Structure formats: C-alpha cells, structure tokens
C-alpha cells in the first residue's frame, strides 16, 4: 500500500493553478488500483486518482502514498508512527512505468461525476496541495492512500453516496483482512501478529475495509450515487491498463514459524535433559533470555511509546513482558531471583492456557516460544516438582 518514494517534480503551485484555470466539463477522473507486489511495502496493493483534461493534455496521478526516505531520523519516526506522508502529483505515464517495472497489474475505473461534482473534486485536490495540507500523519487502518480517496468521494457526494447494506454477523476484523495478503508470507504474518494489539481485532465494516486498495475498488464498485429520482453506479466498468500474472509464492511447511519454533523448543528440551548443570547451560540461558528481552523491549516500545494505535493493548505482552529483562540481569550477575523467574513462568503458562482455551489461531503460532520461556524460567524458579530445576546452591555457583 505504501508506495516507494517517487520524486514529485511537478511544481505544486503550478499544478493547483493549472487545475483552477480549467473548465471542469472537459475533465475525466479515474480510480486507479494497483495489484499487490512482492516487496513488504507493496503486498497490500495501492490506490491513486487520475485526472485527465484532454483539451490541455493534462494527465496526472494524485498519490497519497508518498514519503521521503531522506527524512531525518526516518526509521525512528516510521517505527514511532510519527512519519509524515504526502500527496504526490506526477504524470500518468511515469506512474505506469513504475508499476510495469515492478510487474504489477494496474486497473482503471472512470468515476461518474457531474460538472458540479468535478468542480468540488478539483477544489478538494487544490486544498490537499496547499503547503499546510500536503503532509499528513499516516495511519495504516484509518488514514492512508486508499481511505483518503474514499473520504474525498464522501465529501463530494455526502449522503448521496450509498453503500450496500451489510451483514454485521459475519463481519471480519482488520486483522482478518490484512491476513488475506500475508498468507503467503508466514514470517511476516507472525511478526505483524506479534506487534498488533487488540485494536486490530475490531470489526471492519464495509466502509472500514476500504483501507485496502483492492477493497476500495471492490466496495466503491458496489456503491451507488443518488441523483434526483434515480441512482447510478459510482464507478464504471474496470479497464485493465497493465496486466501480469500474480507472482507464484510457495510457502513451505518447513518454513512455517510454528513448525520452526516447535523444533527449537524440542531441541532446547533435549539440551535441558542432557545438560542440566548450570556450569554448561548458564550462558545458553543468557542467550535465550537476551532474545526474549529484546522482544520485550520491542513490545514496550510499540505499546507505550509509538503513536501507532494498532499496536496498543497487545495480548503478547502477557508472556513477552519486562520481567524477562529482570531475569536476564539476574542471570548475568549470577543472582538468585526466584520470584522473578516464577512470575515469568506463570505468565507464560497463563498465556498458553488462554490460547488453548480460546483456540486462537492468531496467537497459537507463539505457543512453542512461550513453552521455551516457561521451560527455562522454571529451571530457576525453585519448584520442587520440576525435573529440570536447579537448587538454590547451584544457582549461586
């Protein structure tokens, strides 16, 4: 969905002036939908508006998915949800060339607009191009390249734009919708599921689903506009501009995150049986708790520091918690911290039981990782029933 940075060489003030001076009767407007790519930033597809004024040779694309890689502290701002995106305007042929090189299909649909509605659209585009409006704070679910187009149509038509009646019973969640695009990328899906919080499990209505470009196309195609005593489709028939076969992406069972993590768990279980002595296994546990501590810091950041609302209230915070960091410090300093290890153990167990009870496919991927944490934290928890446990005297060695 997020398009790579394209140099917006068109002088924005010139564009705005050019639009303002044209007769709207000569203007054609198209919704452009681009198929998903294989790069991480492109797997959700892309949307843009094309404005054509045949009498003047004006043929430009309006793209709300532009950002600048040269932005100071780019990675920090992106991770923190503080990166500004912008509206970019550039020639249609340049837009197509970019997608042709990426071997991504492009589809076009003319928007059914009357003269007054075209005038309103031109006014809104001009407003969007003003220096104070051209930048906006990107939000994956609620404010992106697709929702900006949806919102413009809603402003133009107001209550005359009618969406189909939807069944609320089987309404999908935001997470369900993005998982449709991540199914061929199991590790990406696992990483996204690890970071997303409860807001991603909100029900996504017909209107909400238009945060995805293909659903913007599909849902707007099913929408109508009221005009006097009749209704007409918002969009005309789809025209294929560029077409490529979808890339073949085969996800092997052996590369599935749950399978890989499960193998790692059984390997660690075997090591726990064979090398029970702290002399041989202490540094191994430091490595394990270091990895989990890093994950805990990531979740801390995305829960409390970032402005990404989608990563708040994360269920994974139950088992990947800050107490792991305390345990790592205790291991590194060779200190006895039974209470902290017990806390980490029981939280991991609570998480596993909860996932099993609610039969969660989303969080089930992480059960092997939670089992690793439960196993190795139990070693230092001084449980009398634990066959892998170490006595207090052994921990101090």
Image (cartoon, grey):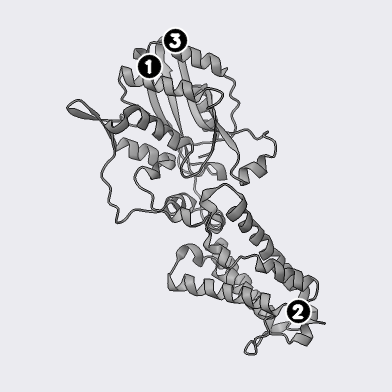
Element class at badge 1: loop
Say if 67 sits above or below 320 in the image.
above
The residue positioned 58% from the left and 24% from the top of the image is: 8
Considering every residue shown, the one lying at the far bottom of the view is 384
| Labels 1 & 2 near each other (Cβ < 8 A) | no
Considering every residue shown, the one lying at the far left of the view is 229
Question: In the rendered image, which quarter contains the C terminus?
Answer: bottom right
Considering every residue shown, the one lying at the far right of the view is 397
The residue positioned 61% from the left and 76% from the top of the image is: 345
Marks 2 and 3, the one that precedes in the sequence: 3
Q: Is residue 243 visible?
A: no
Task: Tell me if 49 is positioned left or right of 289 in this view.
Answer: left
Residue 82 occupies which quadrant of the picture?
top right
Task: Tell me if 177 is positioned left or right of 379 in this view.
Answer: left
The residue nearer to you, when weighing 170 against 50, is: 170
Q: Where is residue 119 shown, x and y percent of the image? A: 37, 18
Residue labelled with disc 1: 27
Say if 57 sits above or below 139 in the image.
above
Residue labelled with disc 3: 21
Residue labelled with disc 2: 336
The residue nearer to you, when weighing 341 against 217, is: 341
Which mark, by number, is residue 283? none
| Labels 1 & 3 near each other (Cβ < 8 A) | no
Residue 190 occupies which quadrant of the picture?
bottom right
Element class at badge 2: loop
Element class at badge 3: loop
- Front label number (1 vs 2): 2
- Front label number (2 vs 3): 2
Marks 1 and 3, the one that precedes in the sequence: 3
Q: Circle 1: is it few (<14), some (14-19), or many (20+) Cα within 10 Å?
A: many
- Front label number (1 vs 3): 3
């Amino acid at each position: 969905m997020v398009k790579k940075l394209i140099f917006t060489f068109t002088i924005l003030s010139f564009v705005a002036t050019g639009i303002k001076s044209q007769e709207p009767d000569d203007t054609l407007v198209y919704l452009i939908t681009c198929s998903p790519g294989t790069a991480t930033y492109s797997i959700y597809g892309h949307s843009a508006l094309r404005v054509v004024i045949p009498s003047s040779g004006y043929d430009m694309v309006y793209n709300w998915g532009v950002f600048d890689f040269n932005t100071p502290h780019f990675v920090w701002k992106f991770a923190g949800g503080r990166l500004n995106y912008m509206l970019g305007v550039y020639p249609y042929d340049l837009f197509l060339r970019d997608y042709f090189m990426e071997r991504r299909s492009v589809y076009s649909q003319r928007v059914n607009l009357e003269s007054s509605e075209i005038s309103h659209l031109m006014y809104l585009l001009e407003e969007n191009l003003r220096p104070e409006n051209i930048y906006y704070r990107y939000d994956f679910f609620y404010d992106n390249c697709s929702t900006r187009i949806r919102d413009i149509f809603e402003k133009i038509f107001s209550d005359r734009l009618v969406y189909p009646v939807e069944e609320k019973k089987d309404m999908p969640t935001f997470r369900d919708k993005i998982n449709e695009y991540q199914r061929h990328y199991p590790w990406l899906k696992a990483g996204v599921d690890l970071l997303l919080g409860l807001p991603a499990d909100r029900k996504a209505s017909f209107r909400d689903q238009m945060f995805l470009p293909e659903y913007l196309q599909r849902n707007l195609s099913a929408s109508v506009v009221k005009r006097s005593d009749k209704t007409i489709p918002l969009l005309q028939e789809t025209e294929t501009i560029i077409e490529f076969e979808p890339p073949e992406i085969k996800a092997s069972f052996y590369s599935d995150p749950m399978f890989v993590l499960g193998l790692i768990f059984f390997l660690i279980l075997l090591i726990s049986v064979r090398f029970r002595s702290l002399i041989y296994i202490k540094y191994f546990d430091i490595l394990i708790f270091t990895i989990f501590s890093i994950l805990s810091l990531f979740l801390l950041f995305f829960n409390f520091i970032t402005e990404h609302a989608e990563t708040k209230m994360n269920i994974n915070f139950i088992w990947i918690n800050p107490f792991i960091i305390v345990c790592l410090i205790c291991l590194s300093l060779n200190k006895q911290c039974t209470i902290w290890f017990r806390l980490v153990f029981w939280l991991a167990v609570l998480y596993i039981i909860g996932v099993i009870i609610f039969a969660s496919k989303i969080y089930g991927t992480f059960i092997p990782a939670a089992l690793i944490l439960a196993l190795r934290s139990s070693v230092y928890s001084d449980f009398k029933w634990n066959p892998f446990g170490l006595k207090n005297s052994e921990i101090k060695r």
